[in-house]
Image (cartoon, rainbow, N blue to C red):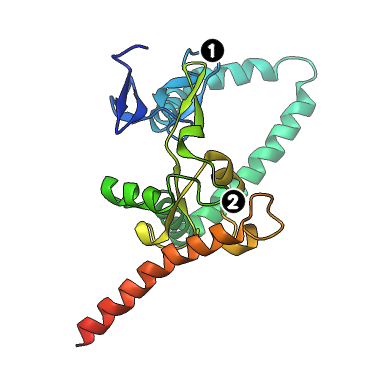
Amino acid sequence: MDIKKHKIINRYYHKNCISCKSWLPATEESFYSVKKNKDGLHSYCKACVLKKAKESMLKNYDKQLERMRERNLLPGMKKAKKKYNSSLKKKKTQQIWQEKNKLKLKNYRLQRDAHKKHNITDVQWQKCKDYFNNKCAYCGLKIEDHKILFKGTYIQGDFHKEHVDHKGANDISNCIPACKSCNSSKHDFAFEEWYNSSNKNFSSERLLKIKEWLNRFKAERQDSERRRRG
């Protein structure tokens, strides 16, 4: 393992983005998958990959235009050009709509981004995992059996901080540990719309435990409100 690019932080493997130099979990949540790399992950974090792509597009804009002009002179390009113009017209229509709905789009992006991450301390996260006996709250997979691909080898990886309510709070009151498979399967479904008897991993005992965990914080909020009202 390249110690300059990889290290263990809080018991889990992290990777250093060679662009922004940030240490991020060595998972596909932080880095795009690249099979040819030894660890199976891109050298740049996802944010830097997108940034570099945008910079490259702007830098080579004139060259791209020139290549397009040359292609338009080739036989058989008339049909392709017509299709392209149709696509361009559709894109222009989208741009006009976006221009008229800037506030709506801004609110959508803010809401989407707000629910991507949890505002949770390391201590809170560990207590959360301890409550669920260091198992996936949905399927019961033990954390020591939760494997992620790293440098072509499967190693133990941390659980996902799962939003129980996709549109709910970003703190510990709306968080449970979930394995990669369950996190991906649930996506943004409503909790009990997805986690019920039709789910192959469903367990009434685990459902009760999840509800008890969530209700604990609901009760704490109610007590806090009563104390404030005095």
What is the number of the mark on residue 107? none
Quarter of the figure with residue 82: top right
Residue assigned mark 2:
186
**Front residue of 51 and 116:** 116
Q: Position of residue 91 (x, y in %)?
A: 61, 43
Crowd tier of the residue under label 2, counting other residues whose Cα lies within 10 Å: few below 14, some 14–19, many 20 or above: some
Earlier along the polypeptide chain: callout 1 or callout 2? Answer: 1
Q: Residue 222: image x %, image y %?
A: 33, 78
In this rendered view, identify the residue nearer to me: 69 or 136: 136
Question: In the structure shown, which secondary structural element does the residue marked by tag 2 occupy?
Answer: helix
Residue located beneath label 1 in the image: 36
Residue 19 found in image quarter: top left
Image location of residue 225, percent across then percent down: 27, 80
Q: Quadrant of the N terminus?
A: top left
The relative height of residue 75 versus residue 188 in the rendered view (above or below) is above
Question: Where 2 sits versus 54, above or below?
Answer: above
Write the residue at 42% across / 51% down.
Answer: 113
Q: Looking at the image, which residue is at 19% across and 88% down?
A: 230
The location of residue 77, given as percent across then percent down, is 75, 22
